[in-house]
Amino acid sequence: MKVDYIALSVPVFFILIGIELAYNFYKKLNYYRLNDSISNLSQGIGQQLTGIFMKTALFFGYKYIFEHWRLFELPKAIWVWIILFIGVDFFYYWFHRMSHQVNALWAAHIVHHQSEEYNLTVALRQSWFQGWFSWVFYLPLAFIGFDPIMFLTLSSFNTLYQFWIHTRAIKSMGFLEYILNTPSHHRVHHGSNPKYIDKNHAGTLIIWDKIFGTFQKEEEEVYYGITKPLASWNPVWANLHYWDDLLKTAKKSPRLSDKVKVFLKPPGWFPEHLGGFQSAPEIDAKTYQKYNPEYQTKLTGYVLTQFTIALIAGSAILFSYTKMETGSLLSGAVFTIFTLITCGALLEEKGWLVKFEYFRLILGLVIVITLKFPIGYQVIFAAIQLISVIWFYNLQKANPNPDEN
């Protein structure tokens, strides 16, 4: 039986985020910003929703190889679990390392590195498309003969392990720093400082970085994010912006070989006629600024309400999608993602949001009525949508000239 350990862990994730957030306020550490955290969590919700449509297919890709082409019959003994744990972690290292060294892979993985903060919400900031290729790196395990359910279990726990290391609250873990991937090691990995870039790719065991020469100890202050900041809270654009950069670069390259290299070379590579490789710039602490557009504080309540609706809707879909009809599943996912777009646009006060938001609110009403949800759900959701329409209308009336971009 397949068990989605990631989905089952979501409540625990939010409890731990709440604990870290309380610690942050108590110590006045400024590890959290509302806009950045909403953006991070939006990526996580979107990743889980889009993942629904590919999880089964990718799992059966591994399963097909195991059933038809495996080399050995391996028992489900403890020693096999231990070897598989090491194998999963080893191949994760190489998947992760290649995701930083091949532009086409980095275009997906970059999403996880866009936040300029470092807290537990960043762990949930995941690419919507990375799952389409990450599984390929683990196929040697299927050929060897490791059971698909065992693989799924250990790969899930490899992912779960990495949640807690996205924190600044834990400084050092003593002798464990020599063996495990720790918060200190992973802070380095998220740094945009030139000396920290492409270091510490480990999942659970830091030994791979030490063996293959990609280890870097945390030394000077880490500046988080990517070298060319995303500067947007739009969750869809976050997943597409680097593809846009690559396509524009390829379009400017007359030689076919250069067009291909744009996608296969490391980040920073450009054809000679466009200046050649561009190294990451040093960071000037005096001029460094995080992306933090101003927004009216009266929007905060509306943003948090709509985000909560998206979170509840996304969670409901995640735990019941196997029982949902295709139309209901697609409509619910689209509405949830539209709601996440709304939250980001509100925090940037985008002018196009006004028409988009009225469309989204009306769409929600149409969906809940036409898809014949239970009458109780229809009444509650319709009431929420109508209240949101009135609330948004009053907010818009009080601020008729938001940013037109």
Image (cartoon, rainbow, N blue to C red):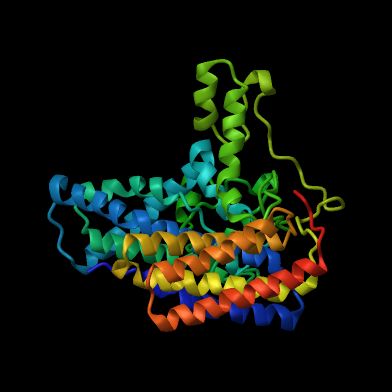
Asked if one can make out residue 110 in the rendered structure from this viewpoint, the answer is yes
Q: Quadrant of the N terminus?
A: bottom left
Asked if one can make out residue 48 in the rendered structure from this viewpoint, the answer is no
Q: Is residue 271 left or right of residue 176?
A: right
Q: Name which residue lies at 51% across and 51% down.
A: 201
Q: Name which residue lies at 61% across and 71% down.
A: 306
Residue 388: give x, y in percent of width and height: 63, 74
User: Does residue 98 lie above or below 291 as drawn?
Assistant: above
Residue 255: give x, y in percent of width and height: 55, 15
Q: Is residue 402 left or right of residue 159?
A: right
User: Does residue 132 lie above or below 176 as drawn?
Assistant: above
Q: Is residue 17 left or right of residue 62?
A: right
Residue 163: give x, y in percent of width and height: 51, 67
Residue 157: give x, y in percent of width and height: 38, 67
* Residue 179 vs residue 272, the one in the foreground: 272
The single residue placed furthest to the top in the displayed view is: 255
Q: Total marks drawn?
A: 0
* Residue 234 vs residue 124, the one in the foreground: 234
Determine the image quadrant of residue 112: bottom right
* Residue 368 vs residue 220, the one in the foreground: 368
